[in-house]
Amino acid sequence: MAGGKEPIEVKFRLFDGTDIGPSKYDPNTTVAALKEFVLARWPQDKEIVPKTVNDVKLINAGRILENSKTLAESRVPVGEVPGSVITMHVVVRPPQSNKSGHSIF
């Protein structure tokens, strides 16, 4: 990797306990890019399917990660074992209804 930074191995835990990954990422990968990866690999047999990165929240060590931050900026190294896989939890924002009660998605 550029700059001598080691890739970071991440898996994404979905709401039902299934996983996407693990895969290795450059530490400069943004959270938004990670969300795009999750969307592209989302299992189509799931009842809930996010449509955009704004429908997805990634949580690492109890913190909701910001789209503009990099993976390196979002890491919580305390308790991480070098070379281990980081598990990020994926939360999908439920479809919002407009005033008439219809889904806006």
Image (cartoon, grey):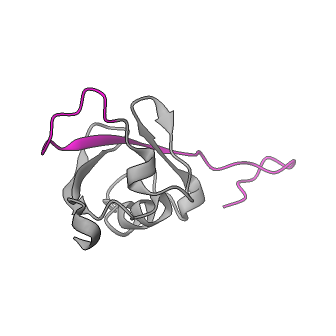
Residue 4: give x, y in percent of width and height: 22, 65
Instruction: State the extent of the magenta-drawn residues as a range.
Output: 77-105
Residue 90: give x, y in percent of width and height: 41, 44
Q: Residue 19, relative to residue 21: is it above or below?
A: above
Q: Is 64 within the magenta? A: no
Q: Which residue occupies 30% across, 59% down?
A: 43
Toward the right, the furthest residue is: 99
Toward the front, the furthest residue is: 3
Residue 6: give x, y in percent of width and height: 20, 59
Left or right placement of residue 39 versus residue 50 in this view:
left
Q: Which residue occupies 36% across, 66% down?
A: 37
Q: Which residue occupies 21% across, 55% down?
A: 21
Query: Which residue is at the front of the view, 89 or 15?
Result: 89
Toward the left, the furthest residue is: 83
Residue 46: give x, y in percent of width and height: 36, 52
Q: Is 89 within the magenta? A: yes
Q: Residue 77, relative to residue 35: is it above or below?
A: above
The quarter in which the N terminus is drawn is bottom left
Left or right placement of residue 8 versus residue 55 in this view:
left
Would you identify the image quadrant in which residue 55 lies?
A: bottom right
Whether residue 37 can be seen here: yes
Q: Residue 3, relative to residue 64: is it above or below?
A: below
Whether residue 47 can be seen here: no
Left or right placement of residue 68 versus residue 84 in this view:
right
